[in-house]
Image (spheres, rainbow, N blue to C red):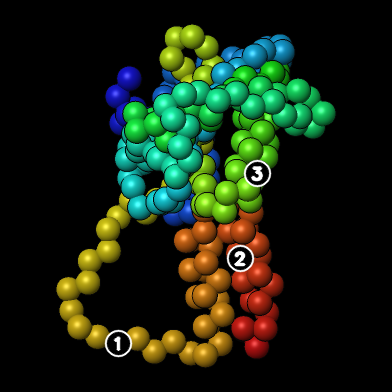
Amino acid sequence: MPLEDFIADHEESCKPGNTDIVATRSSIEVARQIQSERIQRTFFARAFVSSEYSITDSRVGVLQRSTSTWINLSGKERSWQLYVRQIPFCIRLEPGTDGFLQSISGYAKADLPTAAMDLFKSAITLVTDRLVCLHEIPLYIQRIELHLDDAGHKLIEITFSPEAKLSIDHDGGVAIPVFFHSYWSLEREAICSPSSLYRFMCRWRAFESIIRTRR
């Protein structure tokens, strides 16, 4: 299906640095049907990981971005066993065409797609935490795809990038009052960080400083 057909489930969340689900309209309808049935299902999911993180791609660019890491799998899939919330979990480390780790896949059982996504993300977080600490290399989750059925319907979690490009066509300077320095620093950290938790903490810290800044 054309990548341009993927839309955000919540358009109001499409702000630079925010993380949310995109899908085709037909996939959203399938997801809503599954939510109404509330039956335990086994969902297949895949996370595309990278050693270089980018939020500068367009929405279409994020969906088709080819990821690569610094972990050499010698061109072979590797299976890992782990427990997530006391649930046994099996995942596969998958190489790209260059033989290096490109994606991590597995199955998650839940009654809701969002619950399956959360369970799979917990497993991916544990694995990437372990790999980063063990090998001291950066690993980022570029996007996660949750397959709803065998017909190609899926939900994709991405981090939104700026849709507009900045154009500076004149010389100039900028003078920012000293009491705004900490705010702009926090905002820069939030937009540039790949961690949704850290982005939230930066925004919360900025929110806490509003009263003091107004004074």
Q: Which residue is mark 1?
A: 173
Q: Which residue is mark 2?
A: 202
Q: Position of residue 195 (x, y in %)?
A: 57, 53
Q: Dot 1 lies on which element?
A: loop
Q: CA distance from mark 2 to mark 1?
A: 26 Å
Q: Going 48% across and 40% down the picture, which residue do you hit?
A: 71
The N terminus lies in quadrant: top left
Instruction: In the rendered view, tell whether residue 161 sits above or below residue 128.
Output: below
In front: 24, or 40?
40
Q: Position of residue 131 (x, y in %)?
A: 60, 43
Which amino acid lies under the numbered mark 3 shown in the image of this protein? Arg
Which amino acid lies under the numbered mark 2 shown in the image of this protein? Cys
Which amino acid lies under the numbered mark 1 shown in the image of this protein? Gly
Any part of residue 24 in sight? yes
Q: Is residue 88 left or right of residue 123?
A: right
* Mark positioned earlier in the residue sequence (2 or 1): 1
Q: CA distance from mark 3 to mark 2?
A: 25 Å
* Mark positioned earlier in the residue sequence (1 or 3): 3
- Dot 3: within a 10 Å radius of its alpha carbon, few (fewer than 14), some, or many (20 or more) residues? few
Q: Position of residue 168 (x, y in %)?
A: 22, 72
Q: Is residue 151 left or right of residue 170?
A: right
Total tally of numbered discs in the picture: 3
